[in-house]
């Protein structure tokens, strides 16, 4: 079967899906070609910017227990209970590490190498409830020194 005949044997929906996928791939390639590094690198020639992505994770039940999290003034504004990702970045100049909610913008910082931060923003953070108070039975909690299962 010739390639044109093979292509025409596909349903119109399958053909449209393949064309859309090819178009998205082409646009992605063009967008990435525009990601050239500018000559104005503030850090030098290290190849990294000042802020380094450490990772992200889904917030556990303890994220919503951060006691200092302010409620947004706008009733439609996201709260920490709305966060579905916590993003961790490190400032490579100062060593500061921040964990920030992706929707609420609430951040917790830790930097043992700088001046003290506000007590409400330093690790360990103040919690309105501890993990054992959120419905975990004592038998489900990991023993001291154990890593909880993922």
Image: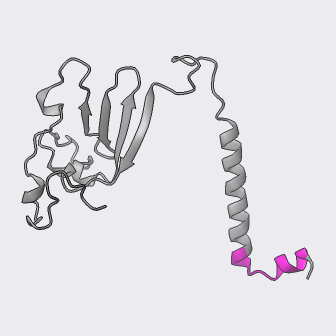
> Count of labels shown?
0
Residue at 70% x, 76% y: name it.
14
Seen as rendered, the residue at the extreme front is: 145
For the C terminus, the image quarter is bottom left
Against 39, residue 11 (above or below) is below
User: Residue at the location (23% across, 43% down)?
Assistant: 74
Q: Residue at x 44, y 32 (%)?
A: 52
Query: Is residue 126 shown left or right of residue 1?
Result: left
- Compare residues 108 and 71 and report the one nearer the observer: 108
Asked if residue 111 is among those painted magenta in the image, a careful observer would answer: no
Q: Is residue 63 found left or right of 56 in the rendered image?
A: left
Residues 142 and 132: in front is: 142
Q: Residue at x 69, y 77 (%)?
A: 13
Residue 123 lies, in percent from the top left, at 18, 35
Name the main secondary structure of what is drawn in magenta: helix
> Foreground: 134 or 25?
134
Q: Is residue 10 magenta?
A: yes
Query: What is the x, y in percent for residue 36?
Result: 66, 30
Image height of 109 relative to 148, above or below: above
- Identify the magenta region: 3-14
Q: Is residue 50 above or below residue 140?
A: above
Which of the colour schemes (rainbow, by chain, secondary structure, one colour) is used?
one colour
Q: If the image is split into quadrants, where does the N terminus sit?
A: bottom right
Asked whether, in this view, residue 24 is left or right of residue 134, the answer is: right
- In this view, 113 is above or below 104: above
Question: Could you say where residue 122 lies in the image, as x and y percent from the top left?
Answer: 17, 31
Is 118 or 132 nearer to us in this picture? 132
């Amino acid at each position: 079967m010739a390639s044109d005949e093979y292509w025409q044997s596909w349903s119109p929906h399958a053909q449209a899906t393949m064309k859309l996928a090819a178009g998205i791939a082409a646009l992605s390639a063009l967008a990435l070609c525009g990601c050239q590094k500018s000559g104005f690198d503030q850090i030098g020639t290290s190849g990294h910017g000042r802020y380094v992505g450490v990772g992200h994770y889904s917030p556990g039940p303890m994220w919503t227990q951060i006691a200092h999290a302010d409620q947004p003034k706008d009733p439609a504004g996201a709260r920490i209970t709305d966060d579905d990702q916590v993003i961790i970045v490190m400032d490579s100049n100062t060593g500061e590490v921040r964990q920030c909610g992706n929707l609420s913008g609430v951040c917790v910082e830790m930097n043992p190498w700088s001046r003290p931060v506000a007590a409400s923003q330093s690790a360990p953070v103040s919690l309105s409830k501890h993990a054992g108070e959120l419905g975990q039975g004592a038998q489900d909690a990991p023993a001291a020194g154990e890593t909880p299962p993922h």
